[in-house]
Image (cartoon, helix red, strand yellow):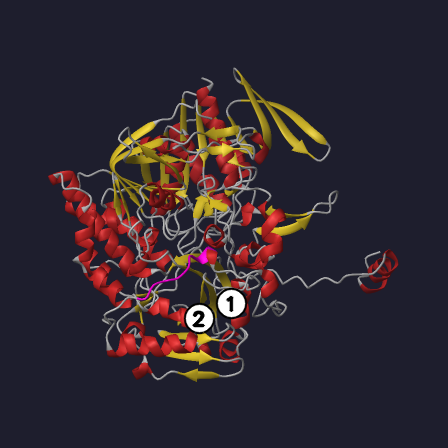
Amino acid sequence: MSDIQREEMLYDVVIVGAGPAGLSAAIKLKQINSDISICLLEKAAEVGAHILSGNVFETKALDELIPNWKDLNAPVKTKVTSEDFLYLNKEKSFKVPNFLLPKSLQNHGNYIISLSNLCKWLGEFAENLGVEIFPGFAASKLLYNEKGEVSGVQTGDMGLDINGNPKDNFEPGINIKGKVTVLSEGCRGHLGKEVIKKFNLDANNKSPQQYGIGFKEIWEIDPEKHNLGKILHSVGWPLENDTYGGSFCYHAENNQIYLGYVIGLDYKNPYLSPYDEFQQFKTHPEIKKLLTNGKRISYGARALIEGGLQSLPQMHMPGALLIGCDAGTLNMPKIKGSHTAMKSGIIAGEVINKHLSQNEHLSIYEDEFKNSWIYDELHQARNVKPSFQWGLIPAMVFTGIDQKIFGGKLPFTLQHKHADHDSLVSAKDSKKIDYPKYDGEFTFDKPSSVYLSGTNHAENQPCHLLLKDKDLTTNYTLEEYDEPAQRYCPAGVYEIETDSETQKKFLKINSQNCIHCKTCDIKEPSQNIDWITPEGGGGPIYSGT
Amino acid sequence: MKVLVAVKRVVDYKVQIRVKADQSGVETENVKMSVNPPDENAIEEAVKLKEQGLAQETLAVTIGDDKAQDVLRTSLAMGIDRSILVKSPNSLEPLAVAKTLSKIIEKENPDLVLLGKQAIDDDSNQTGQILSALLNWPQACFISDLKIEGNKLFLSREIDEGIEKLETNLPAVLTCDLRLNTPRFASLPNIMKAKKKPLDIIDISTLGIDTNPKIKVLKVEEPPKRKAGIMVNDVKELVEKLKYEAKVI
């Protein structure tokens, strides 16, 4: 396919990914200088359709970017009115008194929002400023100039068949070149992964990056039980004490609750199924009573980044910036990444303007970042997540001391020991977990969940989940780890089947079910799976998530 | 030849439809909307006729609120020359849609009108037929092939018995089946160009037609949930159950 003539378009700035970081960068740039031309590519069918987030939103960055957002009918409306933090065991729940909670877990003044809706709103705001947004176009490859600097991206070819041959409606991708490229694909973006490696951006990192997988369901519940503005977090059951994770439950508008679960991908037992832990969590009496007579209307899952400051790569490189959770700006103890992603985008906008107008080097991003509140925030938060390698209770005690007494200013930094793909223990040394059957009322199987996500990929297109070694499952992963992809994938993309002739088991990939969470790319123990972009417009269609 | 294409904005076919809590209709807020899929076939066919030199001008028309401009932009990005939004605060029934289109057709004088065979939201499958009656033009519905020679149209329709071949003259109203063609992707440069193509807005109240609904929607409900199936042990049990429990054989 290398002989294809590709059209070329030139912009000042090319941004990949219309999430909070990329949109904030675009908006900030246009606010400073409306003559700067900006192309923003989004692989989802529309802006917001691949955005899935809790979300209790801190407005700090939005206040800076669009101070009059309240007058502009931004979808940021439901103030947090009350909050509970629970420790669960199988039958009971214990409330942690609010005065014991670190400040990072107190949400007074924050809002319960749908980040998907906010991004849609920010997208319209950006378009009105003249940003050219192209949803349905995936940035599939990076372009480099003769000096080896990033010079833009190539959009994915549309209309290829499963063998990579053009179909009737074939439309070749085009080269979009920019003086600066901004990568804001969100956690584990595939271009972000490429530049981190190519430019050694993580060379000075003290710790390997850490990830989690987050689930979210939207339920319409009985108005009697609904308590607008209430938020609830829990730790404990059904997770074992050595697994990092917890739940959220936010009472949003229209009698909806946003119910979710986050599990650290540094879990050790290959038999653990994050999806089933979440499903089981909903059967806790405390949650069950809330969901009784309710209706699940949405489902999604997405990997999130948890490494914090110790794992944050350098965010600038020749010709490009890496921002938001594509780099890893989430504040883990706060369980919030939207305001920090937005702030990283705002700084990107300012830096790119200085680069274009005063020829400042992109590396000034580093200082600007260090001098802003985002750095202080992440610095304060840095010791919480690594302390959880000691187990839930010691970590909670330590976090209490670190956050409550020392305000995150202890004179040492704990490190993350392993990358998440290195954390699994051999299957033969692990305990099998028997998850309860789905009841169809509170808990559901993966296919009916994926159905609710609106996931779709054009039929007969090349598989976007690439195996470096096609036979690794058969030859190694199945025996060593009982192929954990069957369980860590929240969409049932990976299945083990038996070849009817050879009787050998093999890995079947249902890539059309993929909800673009990137967990496989992160957790595969041998890093054998590469997630690349499928045809633009594919994937889930989240709305209100 | 001038070709007019009617385009409808509908909830995207990939979206899981949800009934509004008050049962007044289907949830469309924050829901992805798209061009009605069979209308994309109509657009593709019009663009092809232009590329073949058979059509000199192509025009897309839609009816809706300001947001409906997005389906016109998509049509323009796929290659349609110009477009008209007939602005209407309410969604219209097929009769009112056909009346509206006939008024536009009076002004624009196209030789050929292409529509999708039906819209995936209400599945009415009426607009093309009513429009042909209002115009007193020949119609062919669910076409899966189209050839034009001079003033003559040669059409194919897939019917139960096989393929029906029809012949008629211009001007005509045709509704398009999914089998007619494969709609192209709008390329990124063409989306850019489409932003500069003409999009005229006409208020429906200026057309002097009665668009009042003739049908009142009482309530919209989800279909009842399907009961879980059971596994039977053998054919005998299956036959017994079909005969005595389900009473279908």
Q: Which residues are magenta?
A: A414-421
Q: Which residue is mark 1?
A: A278
- For badge 1, the amino acid type reads Phe
Residue sticking out furthest to the top: B150
Residue A168 horizontal/vertical position (percent): 53, 28
User: Which quarter of the image is occupied by the N terminus of chain B?
Assistant: top left
- Mark 2 is surrounded, within 10 Å at the Cα level, by few (under 14), some (14 to 19) or many (20 or more) other residues, namely many
Subunit that carries the residue with mark 2: A
Q: Secondary structure at mark 1?
A: helix
Q: Looking at the rendered structure, which numbered label has been put on residue A377?
A: none
> Does A146 appear above or below A347?
above
Residue B108 seen in the current view: yes
Whole-number angstrom distance, CA of label 2 to CA of label 1 = 8 Å
Q: Which residue is mark 2?
A: A247
User: Which quarter of the image is occupied by the C terminus of chain B?
Assistant: bottom right
Side (left or right) of A3 relative to B189: right
Side (left or right) of B65 relative to B131: left
Most foreground residue, A490 or A288: A490
At 50% from the left and 44% from the top, the residue drawn is B95
Residue B67 horizontal/vertical position (percent): 36, 47
Residue A417 counted in the magenta span: yes
